[in-house]
Amino acid sequence: MSTSNVNPKPEYPVVLKELRDIQSQFFDKASNYTRLIFGLGYGGFFVFWSGAKQYLAPRLVVLSALLMSVSLVFFIVFEVAQTGLISYINLRFANAINTPEAEMSVALERFRSECYKITRAWGAVWVFVYVICVISGFGGVAIVLYSFVRSLMPSL
């Protein structure tokens, strides 16, 4: 048995398909997640907040809106930056596949390496943004939920 075929290098069409699939999945997941969060999460909060703010002390009205606004701003900034990053990656991919065939292997490997570094760094950014969004968002929601419970149970 020959060991030269154990880890054969992928063919260009296979690599191109793999890279296109990765980009497509990344974009689809980001778009779906954005719609879900904006449609249900933030929109729903401000609907509940507008109904509950009459039961809150003025400072709690401002604090709950401020916390949710911090969450929303961080999320929007992240999404805008991510859109720019996706555009950059797509441009780099287009440059890699539009090189002469003799240079394409090197260009694709350079793209793959760069894409890996970018997505790894972006993942670290997402963890930071996610923590801020969750803590501030849940803080705003907790204040509104407290106001609903307090209005139902005046002894609190």
Image (tube, helix red, strand yellow):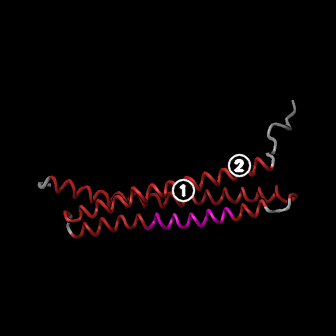
Q: In which quadrant of the rendered view does residue 52 lie?
A: bottom left
Q: Which mark is residue 58?
A: none
> Where residue 111 sits: x, y (%)?
73, 59
Q: Is label 1 in a helix, a strand or a loop? A: helix
Magenta stretch, main secondary structure, is helix
Judge whether 145 appears above or below 69 on screen.
Answer: above
Can residue 58 be found in the magenta stretch?
no
Q: In which quadrant of the rendered view does residue 146 lie?
A: bottom left
| Residue at the extreme top of the image, as rendered | 1
Sequence-first disc among 1 and 2:
2
| Residue at the extreme left of the image, as rendered | 155
**Three-letter code for the amino acid on which mark 1 is drawn:** Ala
Q: Is residue 86 left or right of residue 42?
A: right
Q: In which quadrant of the rendered view does residue 87 lie?
A: bottom right
> Where residue 22 sits: x, y (%)?
65, 51
Can residue 76 be found in the magenta stretch?
yes
Q: Which residues are magenta?
A: 73-90
Q: Residues within 10 Å of mark 1 (few under 14, many from 20)?
A: some
Labels 1 and 2 touching (C-beta < 8 A) = no
**Quick one: quadrant of the C terminus?**
bottom left
> Where residue 68 sits: x, y (%)?
36, 64
Residue topped by disc 2: 18
Q: Is label 2 in a helix, a strand or a loop? A: helix
Residue at 20%, 67% in the rendered image: 57
Q: Is residue 109 left or right of residue 122?
A: right
**Three-letter code for the amino acid on which mark 2 is drawn:** Glu
Q: Residues within 10 Å of mark 2 (few under 14, many from 20)?
A: few
Residue topped by disc 1: 30
**Quick one: quadrant of the N terminus?**
top right
> Where residue 151 sits: x, y (%)?
16, 57
Residue at 53%, 67% in the rendered image: 80
